[in-house]
Amino acid sequence: MNTQSQLPATTKKWGAIQQAVVPLLATLMMVGCGVSATPAESDAKKQLEMLFKNCDLISVHDFKKINGVQQPDGNYLVSVEYLLRSTPSSDSRKKWEEFAPQKDAYKAKERQINEDFKQVYSERSKQSVILDSMRDRDSPQYAEALAKMQKLDEVWTQLNASGKTLLEEHNIIIGAEAKLKKELSETYFRQCKISTSLIPMLDGLIGRDTDAFGSIKEKSYHDNFRLIKTDKGWYFPINVAR
């Protein structure tokens, strides 16, 4: 039996009014509270900036909302692009600038010695083939080729000695850099109070190299933020960001 058809006309009319008015009232209440039906670009940007509200060293730039897709639960998955800039303190940058030339000089010396090793190795290999191919060991040509090989052997010995010295410099530089990184990173995170759950998000911006804590760095991101609607606006908890 269809009980709906037996209801008084006024009751059925009131039910229809309820179906139309209740969602409308809910929408008006949200508008009255200042909450938009869909998250705007400014909503997503504000939430991102809130993550770094206690960190003056990291700033958000070039923020752009690409699109937003409503989820079954009424929340939104928003695709965004933005740039994060890390600007360490002037004191940290000064310390890095004082250390950087030492590291650069070591790197230049390392590259040069490696190139010399490759070149001399190649020349010794060729000269060895030439000596092996010469049958007359008493000829002036053989004596000349042998003398050239001996000079190459001397250079090879010198390069090995330089390599040992370079290894000692390497250990000194690595030790100094590790100590500086520890100091600069501790200073950075004292000034930049952010959740530890944000550290993976900042990979490539800070964390890997010492200069990340001593020089200005920028990194572009393309992320998806799951924004949750509340009576106070749109927000995302850090564990559902990205």
Image: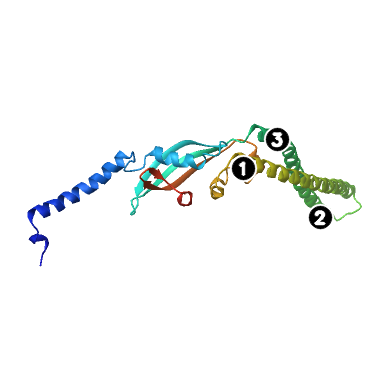
What amino acid type should be assigned to the residue bearing mark 1?
Phe
- Numbered mark located on residue 212 in the image: none
Q: Can you identify the residue that label 1 sits on? A: 189
Residue 171 percent location from the top left of the image: 77, 47
Q: Specify few, some or many for label 2: CA neighbours under 10 Å numbering under 14, 14-19, or 20 or more.
A: few
What amino acid type should be assigned to the residue bearing mark 2?
Ser
**Disc 2 to disc 1, how far (Cα)?**
66 Å
Residue occupying image coordinates x 67% and y 36%: 92
Residue occupying image coordinates x 89% and y 54%: 137
What amino acid type should be assigned to the residue bearing mark 3?
Lys
Residue 231 percent location from the top left of the image: 35, 44
- In the orientation shown, which residue stands out farthest toward the right? 138
Give the side of residue 126 with respect to residue 23, left or right: right
Q: Earlier in the sequence, mark 2 or mark 3?
A: 3
**Disc 1 to disc 3, how far (Cα)?**
16 Å
Q: Earlier in the sequence, mark 1 or mark 3?
A: 3
Q: Nearer the viewer, residue 151 or 92?
A: 92
Residue occupying image coordinates x 65% and y 37%: 214
**Disc 2 to disc 3, how far (Cα)?**
58 Å
Q: Are marks 1 and 3 in contact (CB under 8 Å)?
A: no
Q: Can you identify the residue that label 3 sits on? A: 95
Give the side of residue 213 with respect to residue 11, left or right: right
Label 2: state its secondary structure: helix
Q: Nearer the viewer, residue 108 or 30?
A: 30
Asked if one can make out residue 29 in the rendered structure from this viewpoint, the answer is yes
Q: Can you identify the residue that label 2 sits on? A: 133
- In the orientation shown, which residue stands out farthest toward the bottom? 1
